[in-house]
Image (cartoon, rainbow, N blue to C red):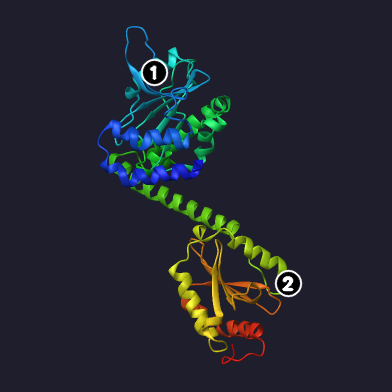
Amino acid sequence: MDFDAAIADIASKIISQGPSIETEEATKNAFIMPFISRVLGYDVFNPLEVVPEFTADHGTKRGEKVDYAIMKDGEVQILIECKRIGDPLHIKHASQLFRYFSVTNARIGVLTNGQVFNFYTDLDKPNMMDDRPFLVLDLADIDETILPELRKLTKGTFNLDSVISSAEELKYVGALRREIADEFREPAPELVKMLMGRVSDRRGTAENIRQFTELTSKAMKQFLKEQVNARLKSALGEAEPAPLVAGAPAPDAEAEVAATNADEATGPADVVTTEQELAGYQIIKAIACSDVKPQRITHRDSKTYFAIMLDDNNRKSIARLWFNGKSRKHLGLFDENKVETRYLLEDLDDIYRYAEQIRDTVRRHAGDQVPGEA
């Protein structure tokens, strides 16, 4: 199982099994050891790689243990302190990490409850673990942007220098993002007063602050929604091939078939056929049945579009349903030169508006055959 699949698998188990876990030991067995093994790639049963209950006596604090130490070439690289899933990860819970960080060669400390993994280093003072993590991974709400940095800590690509060099930016950008998220949830009075002063002449009375706190919260949520919608539209525009316009040069038939086959080669496991796609197919099939037998109308689903064709032949495409977008659905139809034009659908019934074009395409592909023929 590769890195991404391992993270997704453990994340799904946290959601399904997390509520039934009641002890720290069970948390280690269910989530933390699999994370060390399957995500980071270290052999938890090899003491040369992973040492459980690691001891490094320090001053008067003797016999204290860190839950796991990850080793490389006989030196400690990463220290991991574990808590029970659901327990808060306050910095006061990392006392052993603080002490052991200063007496070992470790540059990475991890405090985790199996769901959230806080990664620390020594940016502020050499050999003294920072109070704030430089990277926070929440397996119940994965931030995809940090996964490349997490990869650098895996056994196969361990790159401590690269992690440390980018840790400062990660630390402060991550902290700022969390602060901004808190402001979106509940704007601080200082922010509300600043914004109120920019848009109005009202005084900072308790009533005005209360009113503008509500208005600020509403405005921030609207702004965030607009940004998300804009990004979605942009992503959809990039993810979907540009609409083909009638009159554009005809695509090469062999190239079209090759592209379709390549798209479908991803296999059924990568493709999800939706009820709307099947409903759209049934509408087009019903329209086409006025000219050919219904069993001749076939379909193939791919990651980007749902293809409807005659005789299961890529060269006899009748229509494509571009339903994989989050907010827009299109019907793709072909002219006599096999140039595709896409039409926006408000709902599935809009397909009937293009019934005659669908029939024309079916007749072209069927040649002179009539419904009673094979």
Disc tally is 2
Element carrying mark 1: helix
Check disc 2: other Cα within 10 Å, few if <14, some if 14-19, many if 20+.
some
152 or 189: which is nearer to us? 152
Measuring from the top left, give residue 175's x and y in whole percent: 44, 32
Image vertical order of residue 93 relative to residue 256, above or below = above
Q: Which residue is depicted at the point 31% across and 44% down?
A: 17
Q: Quote the CA–CA distance across marks 2 and 1.
A: 67 Å
Instruction: Quickly name the residue at label 2.
Output: 250
Picture quadrant of residue 181: top left
Query: Along the horizontal axis of the image, is 369 left or right of 102?
Result: right
Q: Can you see residue 251?
A: no
Element carrying mark 2: loop
Tell me which amino acid carries mark 1.
Phe
Instruction: Quickly name the residue at label 1.
Output: 98
Q: Which residue is depicted at the point 45% across and 50% down?
A: 223
243 or 259: which is nearer to us? 259
Query: Along the horizontal axis of the image, is 334 left or right of 111?
Result: right
Q: Quadrant of the C terminus?
A: bottom right
Image vertical order of residue 256 relative to residue 5, above or below = below
